[in-house]
DNA sequence: GAAAGTATTTTTGTATCCACGTATCATAAG
DNA sequence: CTTATGATACGTGGATACAAAAATACTTTC
């Protein structure tokens, strides 16, 4: 299991960012991170470029690498983009979906709810799995990848949301509605439902975006 | 005018890729490119990471950097994604569009056509300007950026298309229809027209994707 | 002519070094 | 007390030389 050092650095920092271990605005010093994982600066700096492309980090010349934070506007923008991309994904997934797949989605929904009830913030991961599964059915690699990348960016905020609010109570119904829409067999209807689902959750999250920066 | 070395390397290679100076599958050797621009390997390798994130280049472990080529499927996928993203952009742009802006778009359309008639492959750049302008009106930074990135990826194929076919004859009408839709004042109608415009051009381009790779 | 082993080349990563930009913070001047 | 000023420490961006590991090419042997 020998991934390149850059891979390792990328995963390491990404994971930390997903879990919210670094706060927005915090500086990431290549030397420190390199020492942490036991490698030299170069692969870490390369990883920074990728993380910057993902929007997880901001690289300003002569000023190094800073953890990116989202403004409310940026958060809404991401949800707008998600709405059309994941809407496209369900529309494309529709023709090749079968009963077995629908039941799998229901099982994922159950797992999500169990995680939610136990208060485990695994809920966020399960939620990503649910959305990711639907995207995967579209069989569009780039689409899948882009949507996943957006989920990573919003993950820290989802965690804050989940920790603060008891648990997303409406989540079960919302996602069940998506499955029902998939059962309808009408691509454009399912697309519509997905779009509304995603745009509907944005305002709830927005409350938890610290107006800092 | 002091961009970092990495910036310079990124721009340099990106420009070459846009113009199709490197062929898909061709290997990019950091040392050579570094020598070309007069710098060391390090910034070039960092630039490679960004180019890989953009999908312009593929980085395979222990096998270096290879110019990415698109399969027909990938090209269609990019156009599907463009259709929803640029569709979203026009929908969002609609409320803040005025007569002055519409006339500007018509001027861009004229410039595009003039470039087309003179056979100059500036046409591709003008075409990007037209689409870019509409996206810009949405005032959504991330959306604008993502769409621009997709245009860069398909640019080499647009050039081949433009050089082979006399010139996109239907282009004038197609884009005029988009402006007309913007004049209609109905966001969802404009979105629909933009989606159809983009999806309609995909098959024409697809013919010029070499079945290599 | 195929397989195995050896050499070569590339890629990848390490370790160091240096010039320059930025930030900090104490001190001096208004 | 606030604002300049300047010294200093720190980190970035980049260069370079070197080492290790992987992939590729080349023998040699059977």
Image (tube, coloured by chain):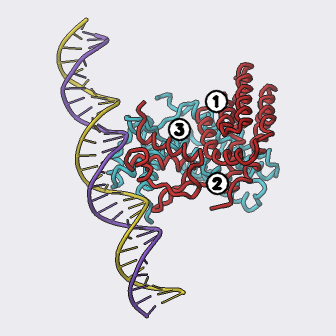
Chain colours: A cyan, B red, C yellow, D purple
Say if A116 sits above or below B212 in the image. Answer: above
Task: Kindly identify the residue that appears in the image at 66 percent across and 27 percent down.
Answer: B137
Task: Kindly identify the residue that appears in the image at 39 percent across and 52 percent down.
Answer: A43
Task: Kindly identify the residue that appears in the image at 61 percent across and 42 percent down.
Answer: A168
Q: Residues within 10 Å of mark 3 (few under 14, many from 20)?
A: few
Q: Earlier in the sequence, mark 2 or mark 1?
A: 2
Q: Report helix, strand or loop for mark 1.
A: helix
Is residue A64 rendered to the left or right of residue B172? left
Q: Residues within 10 Å of mark 1 (few under 14, many from 20)?
A: some
Q: Specify the subunit that label 1 lies on.
A: B
| Foreground pick, A178 / B181 | B181
Q: Which residue is mark 3?
A: A164
Task: Kindly identify the residue that appears in the image at 65 percent across and 33 percent down.
Answer: B129
Which residue sits furthest front?
Answer: B118
Q: Which residue is mark 2?
A: B70
Q: Which residue is mark 1?
A: B136
Cα distance in 3D space between marks 2 and 1: 27 Å
Q: Report helix, strand or loop for mark 3.
A: helix
Say if A65 sits above or below B136 in the image. Answer: below
Cα distance in 3D space between marks 2 and 3: 45 Å
Asked if one can make out residue B100 in the rendered structure from this viewpoint, the answer is yes
Give x and y (percent) for residue B37: 43, 44
Q: Nearer the viewer, mark 2 or mark 1?
A: 2
């Amino acid at each position: 299991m020998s991934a390149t050092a850059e891979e390792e650095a990328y995963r390491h920092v990404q994971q930390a960012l997903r879990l919210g271990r670094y706060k927005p605005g915090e500086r990431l010093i290549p030397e420190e991170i390199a020492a942490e994982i036991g490698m030299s600066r170069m692969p870490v700096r390369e990883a920074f470029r990728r993380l910057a492309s993902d929007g997880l980090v901001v690289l300003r010349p002569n000023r190094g690498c800073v953890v990116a934070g989202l403004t409310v506007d940026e958060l809404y923008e991401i949800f707008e983009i998600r709405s059309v991309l994941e809407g496209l994904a369900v529309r494309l997934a529709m023709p090749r979906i079968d009963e077995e797949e629908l039941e799998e989605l229901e099982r994922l929904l159950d797992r999500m709810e169990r995680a939610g009830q136990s208060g485990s913030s695994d809920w966020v991961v399960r939620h990503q799995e649910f959305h990711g599964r639907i995207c995967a059915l579209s069989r569009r690699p780039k689409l899948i990848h882009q949507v996943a990348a957006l989920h990573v960016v919003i993950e820290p905020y989802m965690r804050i949301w989940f920790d603060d609010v008891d648990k997303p109570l409406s989540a079960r119904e919302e996602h069940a509605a998506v499955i029902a829409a998939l059962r309808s067999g009408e691509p454009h209807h399912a697309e519509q439902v997905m779009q509304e689902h995603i745009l509907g959750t944005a305002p709830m999250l927005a409350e938890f975006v610290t107006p800092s920066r």
